Image: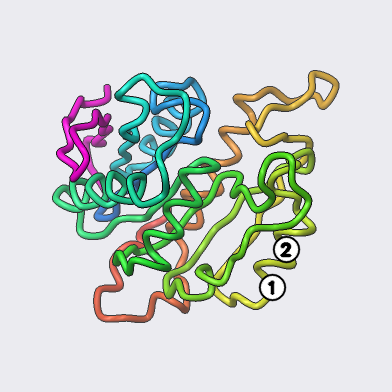
Amino acid sequence: MARRLTIKSPIGKVEARLVMPANPRPVGVLLAHGAGAGQDHPFMVTLRDAIASFGYPTMTFNYHYIERGSRAPDRPPKLLAVHRAAADRLATYCDAVVIAGKSMGSRMGTHLVGDEGWDAAGVVCFGYPLVPIGKSEVRPTDHLGRIACPQLFFAGTRDRLSPPDRMSAALAAIAAARLVVVDGADHGFHVLKRSGRTDRDVVDQLSVTTARWLATPHPAEDRETGVPFGSPEF
C-alpha cells in the first residue's frame, strides 16, 4: 500500500506516493512520471510497486502542472524545482536515493544530477527521450557525462524517441552507463500481442533488471558513502 505524502516545493505543493517495504533496503528509488500522465498512470503504479517488492523504498510524485490540471508541462526550471523537492523528501527516509523516471521524468532526473549536482546514488531512465517528438536530431547529452554515479537506461526496439542505436551512440563514451534494449517495446513499453509477451511481462523485466543492477557493485560508486549497490542479492 502506497503512503500518501504532500511535498512542499518552491512553486507549490504536490502529491507523492511512497511504498515502504517491511524490511527496507538503505537505498530508495524516486520515480518521476512522463509528460503525458501523472504518477497514478497504471504504468507508473505497476512499476513503482514492482521495484518496491524487491525491498527498495520507492516514491512517485506529480509535477506541479499535473496538480493544476494542466496538460502542458512546466518549463524545466519549474520541473526541476519540484523534482529536487521530491528527491530531498525521499532522502529523509533512506540513506541514499536513486533518481529514476519515465521519459520526460527521466530526462529531468539526469539534469537534476548532471547539471544541478544533486547527490544521487544512481540514475535509471525508462525511455529517455533522446529524440524530441516530431524531430530527427537528438537532444544535447553533455550533462550525462557530468553524472558521476552509475546510470542505467532502458530503450524499446520500437521506441522512436529513444532508438537503441542512437542511445548506444550517445552513451558510448560514458563508462558508468549501461543500456538495456527491451525487445518489441515502444516508448510506453507496450508490446504487440503477436510478440507473445504482455505489458506486465515488460514491467517485470524492467523491475527485475533494475533490482539486479541495484544489487550489483559498480566501480563508479567507489566513494565515501558507498551505500546502495552491492547489497545482498534479492
Predominant secondary structure in magenta? strand
Check whether the beta carbons of the residues at disc 1 and disc 2 lie within 8 A of each other: yes
Amino acid type, residue under disc 1 in the picture: Ala
Determine which of the numbered discs, if any, sits on residue 168 in the image. 2
Q: Image quadrant of residue 138?
A: bottom right
Q: Image quadrant of residue 62?
A: top left
Residue assigned mark 1: 172
Compute the Cα span from label 1 to label 2. 6 Å
Relative to 65, residue 208 above or below: below
Residue at horizontal 26%, vertical 36%? 21
Residue at horizontal 56%, vertical 34%? 204
Task: Please report the bounds of the magenta region as a residue range.
Answer: 1-24
Amino acid type, residue under disc 2 in the picture: Ser
Q: Secondary structure at mark 1?
A: loop
The image shows residue 211 at horizontal and vertical percentages of: 46, 49
Q: Secondary structure at mark 2?
A: helix
